[in-house]
Image (tube, helix red, strand yellow):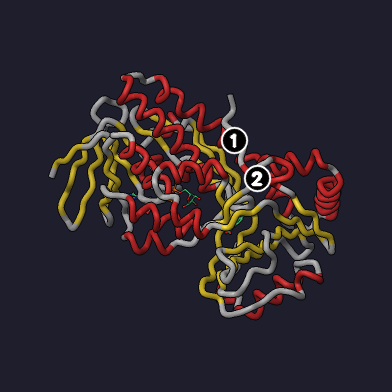
Amino acid sequence: MIASTQVGIIGAGPSGLLLSLLLRRNGVDSVVLERRSREYVEGRIRAGLLESATVELLREAGVGTRMLQEGLVHDGFELAFGERLHRIALKELTGKSVLVYGQTEIQRDLACAAEQVVWEVDNLRPHGIDGNEPRIIYTKDGATHELRCDFIAGCDGFHGASRASIPVNRIRLFEQVYPFGWLGVLADVPPLHHELVYANHARGFALCSMRSATRSRYYLQCPLDADVKDWPDDRFWEELTARLPRALGARLQTGASIEKSIAPLRSFVAEPMRFGRLFLVGDAAHIVPPTGAKGLNLAAADVRVLFTALVDHYRAGSSQLLDEYSARALARVWRATRFSWAFTTLMHRLSDDPFAQRLQLAELEYLAESRAASTAMAENYVGLPFPK
Ligand code: APR
Ligand code: PHB
């Protein structure tokens, strides 16, 4: 079967759905094609920290109501090292806050609002992306379909088909894989602290985050070959307590985990983020390690640049903003890649090298004593503006 639309969107993660909603609000048609079922996509648990610019964009897309009701405004967070705590006062230092609201909830809000989504497609391939008549061929329930469009947005994540369809000599990949992962636990227990706590400890990094006043999200740095089966809840809570300052650890409330998973950490950027009529968006073009939770915020920033360019193209007939998409998105991507890498490097146990550990300590002490250093961290954490 042959169908047509203005923008063919591959992937119904946050990038694809948000792009589709913003386009529709501005009179541009799109169809979203997703490999998985809606239930599967909504069941994925990811980070949950939104920059104010992301909050604004979600509101603009018409999905702000529940987020603003249920999200928790955070004006700061704690850095723990040894027995010390240093609060990064986001609001005081930058005038901005962040919103704690799970990506699982965002995904649900977006999927409820989205209209043109085809779930559970197979064998999807973009075609003709270097010409003027791009199309997406896929199968659904055994039948082959062709979606003709003016542009394709590749919002299909790190393992998707979009980036893979660009000739290898037309794209450059930058990558760093970290020698550890994060073991995450979700539990219906009140959060350890009213703000997030990032802990640097000789036993490894730990993060105490939350989803609500009654649901907590905790992470432990773990070896790459760790297996969740070796981490029963008791062991997890014991290890988390050991990595926190004693006074904080003593307050930890434990309970049965409702989810437990291990994720590897990676930095990755693909340049440019466009080939012909295919535009890469979000995780399809870049991955950051989760320290600082920039992944979703970067994806939202790409969406903002691309939807503005597409709307301008359809309204004014100009391709200038589309031509600038890759450079504008990448300028911000690299700054967030740098911050995520630096925050990861500062907080994790990188090796047994005591020299590296002393350098981390020196930097944490400097952060604790210098308003300028704390401001630099806060500016990055709340989200940098678009470079000029
Ligand atoms: N055909 C169709 N859909 C595909 C294909 C394919 N060949 N390959 C992947 N997909 C779908 C995936 O099933 C997934 O639902 O594309 C979607 C990509 O979604 P995400 O991985 O969430 O990527 P993105 O929307 O860019 O999200 C950016 O949110 O999910 C987080 O870690 C992510 O924080 C980052 C942010
Ligand atoms: C989370 O709540 O999952 C989270 C929060 C902050 C981070 C990373 C993850 O830096």
Q: Which amino acid, mark 1?
A: Trp
- Whichever of labels 1 and 2 marks the residue nearer the N terminus, that label is 1
Q: How far across and down, in percent of the image, does residue 29 sit?
A: 26, 37
Determine whether, in the image, residue 209 is placed left or right of residue 24.
Answer: right
Q: Which mark is residue 334?
A: 1
Quadrant placement of the C terminus: top right
Q: How far across and down, in percent of the image, does residue 217 sit?
A: 59, 66
Residue drawn at x 73%, y 54% as measured from the top left: 347
Quadrant placement of the N terminus: top left
Is the CB of mark 1 within 8 Å of ligand 1? no
Q: Secondary structure at mark 1?
A: helix
- Say above or below: 51 vs 79: above
Q: How far across and down, in percent of the image, does residue 234 sit?
A: 65, 80
| Classed neighbour count for the residue bearing mark 1: other residues with Cα under 10 Å, few (<14), some (14–19), many (≥20) | some
Query: In the image shown, does 360 or 91 lie closer to the viewer?
Result: 91
Determine whether, in the image, residue 80 is placed left or right of residue 362.
Answer: left
Q: Report which residue position mark 2 lands on.
A: 381
User: Between tags 1 and 2, which lies in front?
Assistant: 2
Q: Secondary structure at mark 2?
A: helix
Q: CA distance from mark 1 to mark 2?
A: 14 Å
* Residue 131 in sight in this render: yes
- Say above or below: 186 vs 14: below
Residue drawn at x 57%, y 56% as measured from the top left: 100
Residue drawn at x 64%, y 54% as measured from the top left: 74
Determine whether, in the image, residue 370 is placed left or right of residue 31.
Answer: right
- The answer to which quarter of the image holds residue 19 is top left
